[in-house]
Amino acid sequence: MTETKRIPIILDGDPGHDDAISWVLAHGCGQFDILAVTSVGGNQTIEKTTYNTLRVCTLIGLNAPVARGCYHPLNTEQMNAPTVHGESGLDGPALPEPAFAVQEISGIELWARVIRNCDRKVTIVSTGPLTNTAAFLLAHPELKDRIERISLMGGGCLFGNWTPAAEFNILVDPEAAKIVFESGIPILMAGIDVTEKALVTPADFERIRALNNPVSDIVWQWLEFFYRFHKTMGYEGAPMHDPCAVMVLIHPEIFTIRDFYVQIETCGDYCKGATITDWHGTLGKTPNASCLLDLDREAFVNYLIDSIRTYGEVEK
Ligand code: RIB
Ligand code: CA
């Protein structure tokens, strides 16, 4: 695909195994002009997710500028998920040391620079807590209309995964999520309603392993590590939460998507971090999110494998 036809995007995440695989997909599919990559605290501390961001970009040969995001959520204590992603945040196979350093400027200032310099509106792909996106909107309201849309992994229209009501990314920083969902910027919301169906099974791991290229050799091991935790919870495969936020930009046709008005609960004993979805339009408000509810899993896995296969080809 020619450079001008590629969709200009910023990748923002907390790698994290599924963040890393979403970036493998984004870079491998050849559909995106990746302007910047920023880290956020979530799966692990900002220090660890920043280091992991550099290592993933080095592994996949993604030469976009990398900057460190916000040091902590807007208004809550930092939560991490070592039980899921390990102490490093990206436990499992050995990864290359970073081939380059983070930018001196902050993540949101890197966003401002690349968005100003881009001749088209930019899509934000957020696969972690929404701290950086909210901080950017607060710091640079003058650039809000330069954002095409936000494709995010987060929330759940019907249930949570970190509490009965809340999904992890939203729960880590509900105030940030509230700012984003009330911003008026078009949102694609890949909540756990769909991401828990985006399963990559052990049979699929073997298909990826058989690709036998430097990236597939790591991805199948990330999947195996990620599946270990989820298998204990009864999953039949590794749920590809974050790759859904990328895949929907490339192949929206494989998803079932409905528009809803979604509110973020920022307080409460039981529902803090919930994405309260107005299924029946009871509030009479214009929908603020296109919510992914279902997908063609086989097509999803095939497209993911196609993107990983490109790392064995000379020129992408
Ligand atoms: O709830 C799933 C989300 O939390 C994913 O983004 C995963 O990487 C973790 O950050
Ligand atoms: Ca993530």
Image: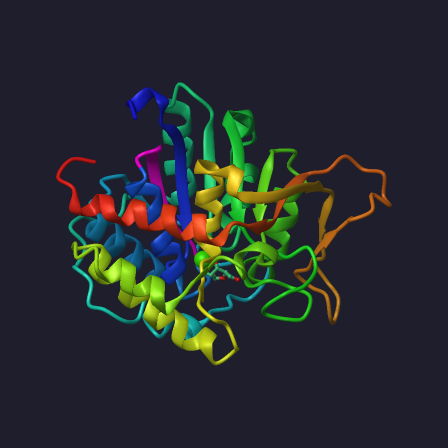
Residue 232 in view in this figure: yes
Which quarter of the rendering shows the N terminus?
A: top left
Which x, y percent locates residue 224? 33, 70
Which quarter of the rendering shows the C terminus?
A: top left
By what rule are the colours in the image chosen?
rainbow
Which x, y percent locates residue 157? 68, 55
Residue 16 in view in this figure: no
Q: Residue furthest left?
A: 314
Q: Is residue 90 left or right of residue 300?
A: left
Is 119 drawn above or below residue 99 in the view shown?
Answer: above
Q: Residue at x 42, y 32 (%)?
A: 112
Q: Which residues are magenta?
A: 30-40
Q: Residue at x 47, y 71 (%)?
A: 236
* The magenta stretch spans residue 31: yes
Q: Residue at x 54, y 50 (%)?
A: 295
Characterize the magenta stretch by its predominant secondary structure: strand
Q: Is residue 109 left or right of residue 103?
A: right
Is 170 drawn above or below residue 187 in the view shown?
Answer: below
Which x, y percent locates residue 94? 19, 67
Where, by quadrant of the figure, is residue 281 drawn?
Answer: top right
- Report how many numbered discs are placed on residues in the image: 0
Which x, y percent locates residue 80? 47, 69
Q: Residue at x 27, y 43 (%)?
A: 103
